[in-house]
Image: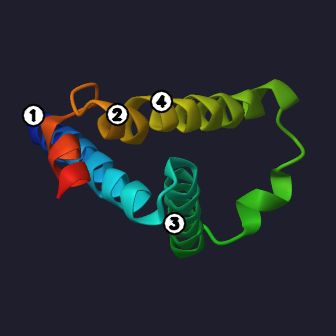
Amino acid sequence: MAADNVRYALLMLVAGLGIPVLAALNAQLGHRLASPAAAATVLFMVALGMALLTLLATAGLAPLARIAEPPKYLFLGGRIFGLLRAFGHLGGTTFRCGQCGILCFTRTTCISWFD
């Protein structure tokens, strides 16, 4: 059991380190596209592609055949995430970094914005 805990802790560490990298890359993309909304859209499209590849590699399309079975309120999570991420991205990372350079998730984001 202890080995599983270490593995999960390392996975969380890698994920935690990935968040500022994602923010920095997306801020740079938003700057180069001159649109934080376009950068968020690209982020979601790439994430959707990766999620679909993972689904195909692990379970195939069979689970999607049951998409109508769960209660509809369970799909609110995706809507809430999309809204929070879109508004958080537009207002938190790229947009504010461009205005003042300090109100962002990490210093790396702001540095990459001005590179």
Task: Measure how far apart labels 1 and 3 are at the Cα level.
Answer: 35 Å
Label 1 vs label 3, nearer the camera: 3
What is the C-alpha distance between the residues marked 2 and 4? 11 Å
User: Looking at the figure, which quarter contains the C terminus?
Assistant: bottom left
Marks 2 & 4, CB-CB < 8 Å contact: no
Kind of residue indicated by mark 3:
Val
Q: Alpha-carbon distance for marks 4 and 3?
A: 21 Å
The residue that disc 3 covers is: 46
The front one of 108 and 55 is 108
Question: Horizontally, is 46 left or right of 115 in the view?
Answer: right
2 or 1: tag closer to the N-terminus = 1
Front disc: 1 or 4: 4
The residue labelled by disc 1 is: 2
Residue at x 14% of width, y 36% of height: 107
- Secondary structure of the residue carrying tag 1 is helix
Mark 2 or 1: the one toward you: 2
Within 10 Å of disc 2 (Cα), the crowding (few <14, some 14-19, many 20+) is few
The span from disc 2 to disc 1 (Cα, nearest Å) is 46 Å
Q: Is residue 88 above or below residue 16?
A: above
Residue at the spot 50% in from the left edge and 67% down from the top edge: 50
The quarter of the picture where residue 48 lies is bottom right
Foreground pick, 100 / 55 = 100
Provide the residue designation for mark 2. 99
What residue is at 27 percent from the left and 43 percent from the top? 19
